[in-house]
Amino acid sequence: MNNIKSIRKDWDLIESLIKEKSRILDIGCGKGELIEQLEKNLKANIHGIEKNQGLASKAIAKGLNITHGDAEKDLSQYANQSFDYVILSQTLQAMMEPKKILKELLRVGSKAIVSFPNFGHWKIRLQLLLMGKMPITEGLPYSWYDTPNIHFFTLKDFENLCKEMNIAIEKSIGLTNKGKQFSIKSSLFPANIFTHEAIFLLSYKNFEPIKIKSTNKIFAKNSAIVN
């Protein structure tokens, strides 16, 4: 699966997770190709943020609603729940503070869609085992000294972080290196080995007060249940 096909497959899966006419923020939107796709197919209201000035200028020249800015600094300008979905596609591994970014995604948006290459894929493991140096694959095509990626993490690392942060994984889709998609949650095979790229739909877990009935009255105890 070459890089262009991989990106297109990633975008199609992202689109499948979004309801029509939603308010969307696309972080690291590049020249705005995904924005154009979602506007056309979902009639969505989309805003984008792009750190690269040249790419942002090209998107703006096409009439797209794009801001040149750094998401790690500028998301604070957005009010809580400004969007229905916030998209971070193939970018989390390039962020300085991934945990902080995840918090901001789910502050600014009701749901977050995050996709990333899985460093636990069998090809990467095999290269490390046999060659003893940083792997180069279709999903991670850079040498160690010129890669834009700062944090390398696996599918299991990401799932553990979501658990630690009390983030609910609503849907999780894996792509093999051949482009075949499967549900990570219901996979019969070790997903952390066979997932080349992963796409997650995230939200915060909802808590409701537990109502305890007494002989005199009904009151809410200071505890909660998870939906």
Image: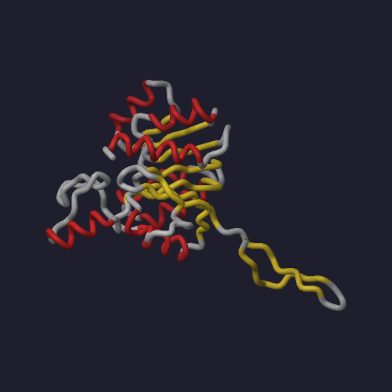
| Residue drawn at (49%, 47%) of the image | 112
User: What is the quadrant of the C terminus in the image?
Assistant: bottom right
Specify the farthest residue to the right.
216
Specify the farthest residue to the bottom.
215
Work out whether 223 lies above or below 171. below
Colour pattern of the rendering: secondary structure
Q: Is residue 147 left or right of residue 197?
A: left
Work out whether 90 lies above or below 56. below
Residue 59: x %, y % from top left:
37, 26
Q: Quadrant of residue 49?
A: top left
| Residue drawn at (37%, 55%) of the image | 98
In the foreground, 176 or 85: 176
Residue 193: x %, y % from top left:
32, 58
Work out whether 189 lies above or below 22. below
In the foreground, 192 or 77: 192
Residue 135: x %, y % from top left:
18, 53
In the foreground, 161 or 178: 178
User: What is the quadrant of the N terminus in the image?
Assistant: top left
- Label total for image: 0
Specify the farthest residue to the top.
62
| Residue drawn at (44%, 29%) of the image | 37
| Residue drawn at (28%, 29%) of the image | 54
Residue 198: x %, y % from top left:
39, 50
